Image: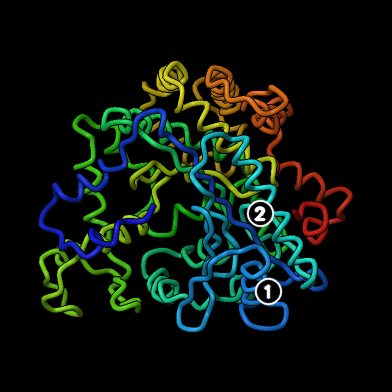
Amino acid sequence: MSIPSAVKSTPIAGRQQLADYLAAGEKPREAWRIGTEHEKFGFLTDSLRPPTFEGERGIKILLETLASRYGWEVSREGENPVALSREGASITLEPAGQLELSGAMLETIHQTCCEVNSHLKDVRSVADELGMGFLGMGFQPKWRRDEMPWMPKGRYKIMREYMPKVGSLGLDMMTRTCTVQVNLDFSSEADMIKKFRTSLALQPIATALFADSPFTEGKPNGYLSYRSHIWTDTDPQRTGMLDFVFADGFGYERYVDYILDVPMYFSLQDGQYLDLAGQDFKRFIAGELPALPGTRATMKDWADHLTTAFPEVRLKQYLEMRGADGGPWNRLCALPAFWVGLLYDDEALDAAWDLVKDFSPVERHALRDGVPKHALKLPFRGGTVRDLAEEALKIAGHGLKRRARLNKHGADESIFLEPLLEIVQANQTPAERKLELFHGPWNGSVDPVFREFAY
């Protein structure tokens, strides 16, 4: 969501202004939309190596060709194309060239799925010509961290230097992970609070259902969602389950306090990223940063700073669900279906909150910490996470049926839950299916994943 240019340069006068910025995201129900984002790994079809930025089969030429062929507008840093935009959607680069589609804010999941399919078709049409493919998984299955390329983006250079100071897996998060997430609206502070609490408590269920990162450097890594595990050792000051969201008195202002305590990465000054890693945003508001003497943070700086916290659910002017591994096209449609079914129907939201409202902090953390390894089979309250997933899917399905958004064949959005229902029924995550193939027909090699699971 872009900030009107008149507001961008407004200096921050106080905490209330920051809370008001979050509150400005409130929308009446009829204006609620669905924004789906997904990342995918590029690979060269002959060597399976990730493409570099430059070169005749590089990411740069992929972006330039997509832009000219399909009418995208190019954004550059210096001479380099780093993002494309068109009709409310954008294509951006993650640090190692993972290609991300940030979809437009759409009314139905039918539209979302059309958008995803058309994007993958367009990307493939260009990638095929370059001898390049794309893979949806949570973690790069084959290549080492030092074999991953880096994209020429200013903010990534700053993060690359800072990450090893605060955790041991932050560079893996940047270069070797892919996710799918959905951004959803709220109507009021009370609605935001209920959706935030419900989705935060249920985020490990999404992690379990979408678990698809069982390999590191060609071998099983002992996890089903290694991507999810990576977040536990990236940067404790900007990740996690946010216990304060469940405390009395939580609202916009309490979230502002949390973000103000998150150390900075950068400020964009005159088109250049200025390295402010580890510095205090509150001092920036006061104009007291040594690197920017007398310069006071603006609302644009605040909007940027909000994007540098990475909790399991993130609040901006909408709520972002951040718990799922990337995957094949049908799961890119299943994630928004799961969360829209739970959060956009009042009866479903009540039922989902009933499911999780008595979880203790210890239980919420046990789910978050146990799911990366055990996914659906993690024991919980005399049953397993699979039982929770089954119940959540039932609630989501009813929610989508009541929403009654039909496609031209008269089917409602609950059709998009099918891949998740199959996973729960089989009690086998996508990661476990790949491990079965690895130990069976693939004869201990991960290479077939690039052929059998590419888009």
Residue 96 at x, y = what percent? 57, 70
x and y, in percent, of residue 356 in the image? 42, 24
Q: Nearer the viewer, residue 211 or 348?
A: 348
Q: Is residue 237 visible?
A: no
- In front: 401, or 8? 8
- Is 452 placed above or below 56 here? above
Q: Considering depth in this image, is 29 or 195 the residue closer to the camera?
A: 29
Q: Which residue is disc 2 drawn over?
A: 119
The three-letter code of the residue at mark 1 reads Pro
Label 1: state its secondary structure: loop
For numbered disc 2, what is the local secondary structure?
Answer: helix
Instruction: Examine the image and state in which quarter residue 150 appears.
Output: bottom right
Q: Nearer the viewer, residue 76 or 391?
A: 76
The figure's colour scheme reads rainbow
Left or right: residue 14 compared with residue 239: left
Q: Position of residue 237 (x, y in %)?
A: 32, 56
Q: CA distance from mark 1 to mark 2?
A: 19 Å
| Mark 1 touches mark 2? (CB < 8 Å) | no
Viewer-nearest of discs 1 and 2: 2
Which residue bears the numbered disc 1? 51
10 Å neighbourhood of mark 1: few (<14), some, or many (≥20)? many
Picture quadrant where residue 161 is located = bottom left
Position of 295 compared to 368: left or right?
A: left
Q: Position of residue 271 (x, y in %)?
A: 35, 77
Q: Quick one: label 1 or label 2, which is nearer the N terminus?
A: 1
Disc tally is 2
Residue at image coords 30%, 60%:
305
The amino acid type found where label 2 is placed reads: His
Query: Residue at image x 57%, y 32%?
Result: 337
